[in-house]
Image (cartoon, grey):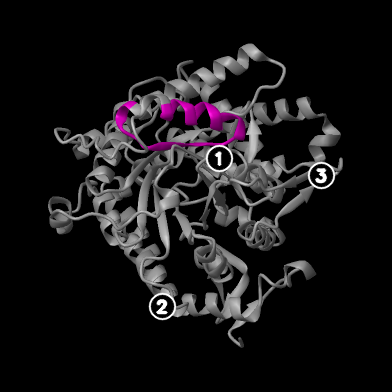
Amino acid sequence: MSSVVLKKQPQSEQKQVLSREALEFVADLIKRHGLGLQRLLQERMDLTARLKRGERLDFPAETSEVRSSSWSVGEIPHDLKVRHVEITGPVDRKMMINALNSGADVYMADFEDSFSPVWESTVQGQLNLIDAVRRTIEYRSPEGKLYRLAEKTATLMVRPRGLHLIEKNMLVDGSPAPAALFDFGLYLFHNYEELRRRGTGPYFYLPKLESYREARWWAEVFADAEKTLNLPHGTIKCSVLIETITAAFQMDEILYMLRDYVTALNLGRWDYIFSFIKRLGHDPRYLMPDRSLLTMDKHFLRSAALLLVKTCHRRGAYAIGGMAAQVPIRGNPEAQQKAFSKVREDKLREISQGFDGAWVAHPDLVPLVKNLFLENMPGPNQLHVTHDNLTITAEDLLKIPEGERTAEGMRANMEVGLRYLESWLRGNGCVAINYLMEDTATFEIARALIWQWVKHGAALSDGRRVTPQVFEEELSNVLEKLKNEMGPENYKLLKFELAAELLRKTVLNEDFIEFTPPIAYDYLG
């Protein structure tokens, strides 16, 4: 343990999470796989440089045999065979109980986009998972209401943080721990035996993979962890989020590298568009319109969705659709019905495309989405929908939708992005804004669009071009609006000025900053 240093000690009830044995297991994974991870992160930087020099994204030539040959993924566990509706949310104790009791088929406990990684919350999240797996988790509200698990609960999956993130409060050989291995290793170490005893297993959702090499790295981590814990090969199972533009060109390869472990792919819309701008936004040919126009019926997003279904079903994996982010609108039945109608339309689209299930952000949406799949999808899945005659080309995936860019759209991005980041900086990474559940992807897509408009001096519908000066003028207007709504005294107690400074940094930088959380993380405990 001499190589492991905790910069902060756990609270007394959290000490079991950071036991000597658990930390040794995590440190061992880091020592064996940390260097490989650093190489992969460097590959991302190298790709950015090549794209700036004019290289075009395409399906990899070196893996054409993987795409053309016949193979399939491994056996899908019994408790992941029906995935009509999956609910996601952070590892807060009350939210976890409500999600597990929601009636959803799967609950994804999230250490990533809907989570603000304050140290105490991160360790407590692991403790909450320990209790949830053992079905001892309880929560009593300040009003005295007791929350407990129901007899039947959703299948538990865990999303560790992305490969680009660190856990600054754990040092191994003097360097911060890769957050992905910290989250994965602690959950696996503490729960694998209990999960198997209960007839389930350690199941994970992998975020933000950029390439099949990153998928191969995870497969090596899984195999190593299984060997260390004397688990049969393939005990660990995962689903992979296709939320980067580069991963869209490598879905077959990602499934192949994880074929002994993977059960599904899932299309993450906002992060996918964010990644599109991150990788290609330097090129004015890929200038995006208002965010409100970037809907799933647009050709580039529809193409990615259909390709995901075709790829998954050809290989025996499930295709999971996107997030229904609506939250209940209490006291306004008409607005509630309108919001639910949007959910219904979106999920019927996914069912018609061949998806086997979809995500929701709130328990109230579970019955609606579950019934849509039960009523419109014969059988537990749609693996029979193979789109054999469908061909998706690189041009299909890279076709930018037409549409105007407006000052209203820019201000909306600023306001929602600032509201979210301000909350994240105070330790809350899952925020309802305008009756939509927002996460880190909200800020990332917002600032990415504005960065691109500033970089290329995009023309707005009011005749102005987006310059740094125009950005500052509109930002001042948004901040003044927020201050007036909250009152000057309340405004001072919050972190909007810091959020605005981070927005400036990410928008006005000449080169695109890969991710915001690594910068904002310095301001968290």
Secondary structure under the numbered disc 2 in the rendered image: helix
Q: Which residue is mark 3?
A: 141
Q: CA distance from mark 2 to mark 3?
A: 42 Å
Q: Kindly identify the residue that appears in the image at 23 percent across and 33 percent down.
A: 396
In this orientation, does residue 466 appear? no
Residue 252 vertical placement versus 381 (above, below)? below
Which circle's residue, 1 or 3, is located before the other in the chain? 3
Query: Mark 1 — residue?
Result: 443
**Residue placed at 59% from the left, 32% from the top?**
414
Query: Mark 2 or mark 3, which has the lower sequence index?
Result: 3
Any part of residue 445 in sight: yes
Secondary structure type for disc 1: helix
At x 32% / y 39%, what residue is drawn? 283
| Disc ID at residue 227 | 2
Q: Give the extent of the magenta segment.
A: 352-374
Evaluate if marks 2 and 1 touch, with contact meaning CB atoms under 8 Å apart.
Answer: no
Q: Is residue 360 magenta?
A: yes
Q: Does residue 18 sit above or below 523 in this rendering?
A: below
Q: Which quadrant, please, contains the N terminus?
A: bottom right
| Amino acid type, mark 1 | Phe
Total labels drawn? 3
